Image (tube, rainbow, N blue to C red):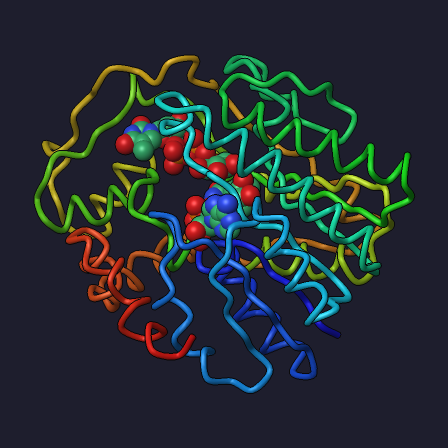
Amino acid sequence: MTIMVTGGAGFIGSNFIFYDLKKHAGDRVVCVDKLTYAGNVSTLKSVKDKPNFRFVREDICNREAIYAIFEEEKPDVVINFAAESHVDRSIENPDIFLKTNIMGTVTLMDACLKYGIKRFHQVSTDEVYGDLPLDKPEMFFTESTPLQTSSPYSSSKASADLFALAYYRTYGLPVSISRCSNNYGPYHFPEKLIPLTIVNALADKPLPVYGKGENVRDWLYVEDHCKAIDLIVRKGKAGEVYNVGGHNEMRNIDIVRLICKELGKPESLIRYVTDRKGHDLRYAIDPTKIHNELGWLPETKFADGIKKTVSWYLENRDWWETIVSGEYRKYYEKMYGKRQ
Ligand code: NAD
Ligand code: TDX
């Protein structure tokens, strides 16, 4: 099977590529990534020379180029990870979120209609449901929770979901959607809470905590998310939405304190800073549907996953140091400049 993975030089997409190539050795994986600031092609160096892997630097909004890749590769499945993914950036500059997250998704689906496809999978987020109150722990997001977004990021992701469902109903495109909670693990870009805290703590820099640090996120180890997507694409039903999450709710401040403890760094590094505008209070996923229908369950407990993640950042300093220095943006030219 040929799988097109868009956004595969980012955090979750790259982890998915590693998972897929290991689990389904017969697959061909074509990674399409624009290499924005969040894309780091050096992440893919362990697979880049495999005969069944190809990297194409392209923007999912570039219709002509996307059609040409479809024409050449005839993918059976497209899994769309490509997105602007950082909420804080969406508050500063919503425009690119509309372009990539909505227009890019629609462009990919048009290509799927034109060339035919077994499945188009949209990687969405629990943020499309808005937030839950902090004082109602019995409330969870189910697949039928109304979409009620807070940020330009989540609004763009919800719009893409609606377009995907419209393409299923109107044109019969075999679409599926996963809405996952916060991921953590290797190759997480150090602008997000967990990797930023690890990287700053290692440099004895301040650890910014928004507001009072009481906002709650539901954390899932990235490989468990990849397993869920693999199951949905191969066994899930077209036209369906699947929530993905592991019932692991944590307050931000507790995460930051835990990382300080793991690294032997003092909590005096913590700085309470101005809150994010429109900051969602709590996310919590009810994963009953994917469990009952596809047998998915998270396998990595948070206590183990966070230890593995901290160790990974300690053992892979090169990966994040070149990001912090900006050097990683030259890697593509160095590795691929002469090849294309
Ligand atoms: P990321 O920011 O780490 O990676 C995004 C990748 O997409 C980068 O490699 C970037 O270069 C690429 N990209 C951006 N714009 C592009 C364009 N126009 N054309 C082609 N490539 C482009 O993001 P991530 O955390 O890996 O998230 C992947 C997907 O999962 C996103 O759709 C996000 O909304 C969703 N998601 C993320 C989380 C999370 O906790 N990180 C949770 C749920 C869902
Ligand atoms: O420096 C920080 N300090 C802080 O307190 C940062 C970067 C974040 N925070 C808070 C904001 C959130 O409550 O930590 C929480 C997590 O923040 P992020 O890592 O930015 O993630 P979040 O906004 O929850 O969104 C993430 O999960 C859902 C991903 O970035 C999205 O792409 C995904 O859809």
At x 45%, y 78%, the residue is 48
Q: Position of residue 196 (x, y in %)?
A: 26, 43
Q: Quadrant of the N terminus?
A: bottom right
Q: For this rendering, which residue is in front, 242 or 325?
A: 325
At x 63%, y 53%, the residue is 64
User: Relative to 3, is 156 above or below?
Assistant: above
- Is residue 46 something that shows in the picture? yes
Could you tell whether 242 is left or right of 332 in the image?
Answer: right
Q: Quadrant of the C terminus?
A: bottom left
Q: In the picture, residue 253 is in which quadrant?
A: top left
At x 60%, y 41%, the residue is 104
Q: In the picture, residue 223 is in which quadrant?
A: bottom right
Q: For this rendering, which residue is in front, 239 or 129?
A: 239
Q: Position of residue 63 (x, y in %)?
A: 63, 48
Q: Position of residue 270 (x, y in %)?
A: 16, 30
User: Relative to 81, is 231 above or below?
Assistant: below
Q: Position of residue 250 (x, y in %)?
A: 44, 33
Q: Residue furthest front?
A: 64
User: Relative to 20, is 309 above or below?
Assistant: above
Could you tell whether 206 is left or right of 12 in the image?
Answer: left
- Is residue 251 something that shows in the picture? no
Q: In the picture, residue 107 is in which quadrant?
A: top right
